[in-house]
Image (tube, grey):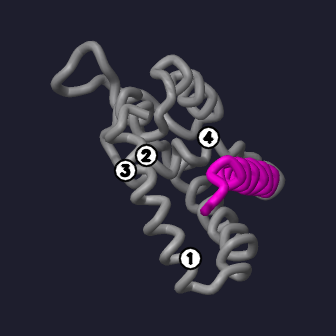
Amino acid sequence: MVDLGRLHQDLARVETELWNTLDARLRAECGLPITSFMVMRFLTRHPGSRIQDISQEFAITVGGTSKVVDRIEAGGFCRRRPHPHDRRSAIVELTPDGEDLVSRAVTVFEAELERRIGSAVAEQSLAQFAATLSMLRTALSSNGG
């Protein structure tokens, strides 16, 4: 029988170590914290997003999301513009400088993922692990958690 407590501990530890490694490399090579990178990458993939959309994607509060966007905006990498159909919200979009930065950061991010994960585990094992994580994520979200 699988020790679920140990599995949880291993998942949390791997996630924390990977997050910290990626954050350190993104900061060193791009001057970009991983939280900002994640939001900027989301905006690249989902143009026309609102703070609420970003918040839902990362399962964080609207207030926390707004603070991350404030920091990105203060750096000149994104801007808010009025939502064309909802006066109460704004669209967040990357500036040209933001697009350039996230493009460089994606290269760094993907290289580090390949170094830390892709080269450490066989492709077939990674595919199975990804499928298992997807099933777990679906099960957790459907159970209110």
Nearer the viewer's eye, disc 2 or disc 1? Answer: 1
Q: Nearer the viewer, residue 19 or 131?
A: 131
Quadrant into which the N terminus falls? bottom right
- Sequence-earlier tag: 3 or 2: 2
Q: Position of residue 97 (x, y in %)?
A: 57, 48
Mark 4 lies on residue: 36
Determine the secondary structure under disc 2: helix
Cβ–Cβ below 8 Å for labels 2 and 1?
no
* Residue stretch rendered in magenta on the structure: 1-26
- The answer for how far apart the CA atoms under marks 1 and 4 are is 26 Å
Residue 107's quadrant in the figure?
bottom right
Cβ–Cβ below 8 Å for labels 4 and 3?
no
Examine the structure image and report whether residue 20 is included in the region drawn in magenta.
yes
- The answer for how far apart the CA atoms under marks 4 and 3 are is 25 Å
- Sequence-earlier tag: 2 or 4: 4
Mark 2 lies on residue: 43
